[in-house]
Image (cartoon, grey):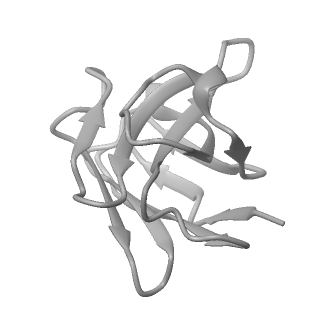
Amino acid sequence: QVQLVESGGGLVQAGGSLRLSCAASGRTFSSDTMGWFRQAPGKEREFVSAIRWSNSNTYYAGSVKGRFTISRDNAKNTMYLQMNSLKPEDTAVYYCAARLGLALVAGASSYNYWGQGTQVTVSS
């Protein structure tokens, strides 16, 4: 059974940093992709970033490009999201997701597995 478990969320002031982790168990995703999404209250879930596990190719939403960095650790079967220069509008529940296949895509419906989410709150 595949499980994705996020950690690292919390409360931070604007301009600060956080690093989210997503630990995967139940299978390896060496031929697949993983991504981060977020959902703010009253808004739809939106794509943040994705990474192809095999070669670490990445894809970012325009709103986070240059501030967030996605990465993965093969040995730990874990994905990360380093978030710098955080803004109040980054406040949301952040979810990690895994997709079977190599394509880097932004559509949430294309992802097969989801974590339970971790809250990130950025105060002004």
The quadrant the N terminus occupies is: bottom right
Residue 94: x, y in percent? 60, 43
Tell which residue pokes out farthest to the left in this image: 66
Residue 17: x, y in percent? 34, 57
Residue 87: x, y in percent? 37, 34
Q: Nearer the viewer, residue 124 or 63?
A: 63
The quadrant the C terminus occupies is: top left
Direction from residue 24 to residue 16 in the image, left or right: left
| Residue at (48, 44) in percent of width and height | 35
| Residue at (50, 76) in percent of width and height | 77
| Residue at (49, 72) in percent of width and height | 78
Direction from residue 101 to residue 112 in the image, left or right: right
Q: Nearer the viewer, residue 58 or 64?
A: 58
Direction from residue 62 to residue 119 in the image, left or right: right
Q: Give above or below for 21 relative to 56.
A: below
Direction from residue 56 to residue 37 in the image, left or right: right
Q: Give above or below for 8 relative to 56.
A: below
| Residue at (34, 48) in percent of width and height | 51
Residue 61: x, y in percent? 32, 25
Q: Quadrant of residue 14?
A: top left
Tell which residue pokes out farthest to the bottom in this image: 75
